[in-house]
Structure formats: C-alpha cells, structure tokens
Amino acid sequence: MGVQKLEQSISEIIKDFRQGKVEIELNCEHVHKWVSQFDVDDQKIILEETLQVFQRWYFNKTKIEEFLDNVVRSVVQDENYESVHAIFKDTVFLDMQEKGKSQTDLVQMLQNLVKKKYNCDINVQPQVSVDNKYYIYIDDGLFTGSRLIKDLTRCIEQASECTKIDIWYLISCESGQSYGEEKVKSKAKEKNINIKIHVMNEIHNNKTIKSVNGESVWDPRQDCLWPNKNLNDVPIIKDYKTSLERTFGKERTIPYFYRTNRLEYFPGIFSSMKNRDIVERAFLKKGIEIVQKCRTEKGMYPLGYNLYPSAGFGAFCATDLNVPNTCPLVLWWGNIIEKGDVLDNWYPLLPRRTNEKSMTIIDFSNEIPYSNAGQEDAWKQVYTTCPACGKGICFENDGGTGFCINCSADFS
C-alpha cells in the first residue's frame, strides 16, 4: 500500500476522534503532517504499523456502543426483577470522574441506548451512598490502575456493607488491572463489598521475568511499546536513560527500561518484530526530544505517563472519546494550531482534551503512588549463567547476547 493510501486509511479510522471537538478536520493531510516529523526512512513503516494497530485498537462510536450494549445486557439478565424498568430503577450508574474524563460521555451514551431499547431512564449518581446496594462503574480504559484505586476507594468508604459494584472497561492493561484489583479488593473485603471487574479488550503487558527450577519464565505477549535493549547504543536514548537514573537517585539501571533480546517475544500489536523495533525507536527518540523541550512533572515519559521511572507506559490505542496519556507522547502531545507556547514543538495525530490549555507542565500530582516491589524482586532473580565468567545472569545484568553485561561486548 502506498503512503497516500496509508494516510487516507488512517484518517478514515480517526475522522470522528473526539466527536467533532477538534479544531481541524483529521484528514489525510493531517496524518501526513504528523508522520512527516519522523525520519524519512521510518515514515512508511510508522504509517503501516499505525494502521495495523488502529484497525484493532481504535474504538469508534459503533464499537463503544457494542461495549455499552454488553453492559446493558448483563444488567437486564437479572431474574430477581419483574420488569426491566425495575432493574434500572435499582441499578445506579456512577458518573463520578472530574469534568473532561470519558466516563460522563459513556454514561450519556448508555442512557441513550437504554432509552432507545427499553424506553426507560437509568439512575445516574455522582457517588455511592448507603441507600443503594448495586452500582455500575464504567470507563473506557484501565492502564496504570491508579484511577481505579482512587475512585473505588472512595466508593468503598461511602458504601454500606454487602454492596455490589460491577466495573466495566472497554480496554484494560494486564499489569494495571492486577495491581489495581488487588488494592481495591483488599479494601472491599473489610466491608464485605462484592467487586467484579469485566473487561472487553485486554492488553498484555506483564514484563516480569522469573526463574522456576532454573528456567526463565516470562510472558512473550507484549502489547505495549517496550524498547529493545539494542537501543541503548543510540546516543539520545542512552543519555536520557542515564539522566533519568540520576534524577531519581538510582545507583543502578532502572528495572525493565529495555526489553532484552535474549528472550523471545511476540510482535504483539505489530506486524513483525522488525517493524516493532523501528516504531519503538522512532517514538522513543521523538518522545525524548519532546520531554527535553518542556518542563514536566514526575510521571511524564517519552512513551507515555507511568507511575514509576521508565521509558513510558507504552499503550497504543484510542477511542472516539479520547486518547490515553499512557500512550507515546508523539501520538497526543502538542498543538494542531500554533499558539506561541511550548506545545508548538510537536504536531499530534490525536490531540488530547488536555491540550486545549496552553501548558508547559503536565500535572499528575493527584495520581496514586505505585509500589514496584514485585518487579524489583523479579529483576534480581538469576535465570541463567554467563558462559564466560560463570556469574549468574538476572534481568539487571543481562547483556542481551547470552552473556552478562560485563562480558557481552567481547562475545557480541
């Protein structure tokens, strides 16, 4: 497929992004302007892979409505009620996120769906109370897990004992769900509150490597961007990583910053490992340039916001409602119309709602701190032996060639 056809195909997918609230038409010229910011040799592959990803991981209004229809069908299946109207009267749909988040849009779309199918209204409340026993919390995406913890902690504190809360996500990342679910359910258990998470589309991103009976055990499915360790040879990337370690006072390398090439991984959301490496390199290099041009709060990294020091979370997905800030900065950061501020340094493919404000600082101060103890422990686990010096190899000192980092240069 030629470049112009690729640009046209991507524009057809994203044309209704943010439902007409973007200042320009997201046409093929818009896509061309975005991709032209990358190195010429990378542009066609970036277009090919963006199209590949968005064909599966961009959710337009129709796909969102299919998700909401699943939520509705789960509610009306309750056999303890005589009528659908009675079910929706006793079921509370939460609209508790601050203005600008997707939850309000989703609840409104669900209201329209129920009205059309059953000719009745839904019960929408901004918070949990002791007067109701069944709540539904819907959101478009779960990534780091911090919002789940923040919102559900508030729900649990306000709810009476034996309350039931069903949580529905259009998209959920494996790591964030595991982290958030563990925290939330431990709090809910104290009040005998029943919490269940339902996920329509799961993103695999468990990076932990363990040693079991002397054998390396890891998940080869990695759907988030996670740069190959070979990129440490690229000066701008190596310097950024060193600077990041210095900023956070690390005496050693940051865990899981790179994906080792010693272990075999699947292409994930990409068409091939070769193209995956090219896109990750391009997005990381340009993301670093963006970070270096603006002052950022702790949490903003080249491949997207994350709760701990890294290259970034690396999600690669979007909906007609918005794009997650856990996606690479090159997708969403910047101005589509120059405004004379730092955001003019990049032209985004999918301008986020937050970009409407002229800002030089992305503030994530209200997010929940992340404990990375589990990954830190796995980082130190020895899973093989260096054949040159005989020392144990763990993820911390893996040279990526079958040798430890000290011997790798002599045998690569």
Image (spheres, rainbow, N blue to C red):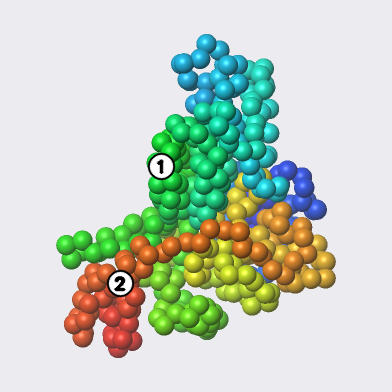
Residue 148: x percent and y percent?
52, 48
**Can you identify the residue that label 2 sits on?**
380
Q: Which residue type carries mark 1?
A: Glu
Secondary structure of residue under mark 1: loop
Task: Please name the residue that numbered disc 1 is placed on.
Answer: 190
Relative horizontal placement of residue 217, taking residue 27 as reference (left or right)? left
Q: Which of marks 1 and 2 is nearer the N terminus?
A: 1
Quadrant where the image shows the N terminus: bottom right
Q: Residue at x 50, y 83 (%)?
A: 246
Q: Position of residue 255 (x, y in %)?
A: 40, 71
Q: How crowded is mark 2: few (under 14 residues within 10 Å), some or many (20 or more)?
A: some
Task: Please indicate, yes or no, whether residue 174 appears anywhere in the rendered image.
Answer: no
Q: Position of residue 248 (x, y in %)?
A: 50, 77
* Residue at x-position 77% and y-position 57%: 356
Q: Which residue is drawn at 73% across and 59% down?
A: 355
Q: In which quarter of the image is residue 38?
A: bottom right
Asked if one can make out residue 372 in the rendered structure from this viewpoint, the answer is: yes
Q: In this view, does 179 lie above or below 228?
A: above
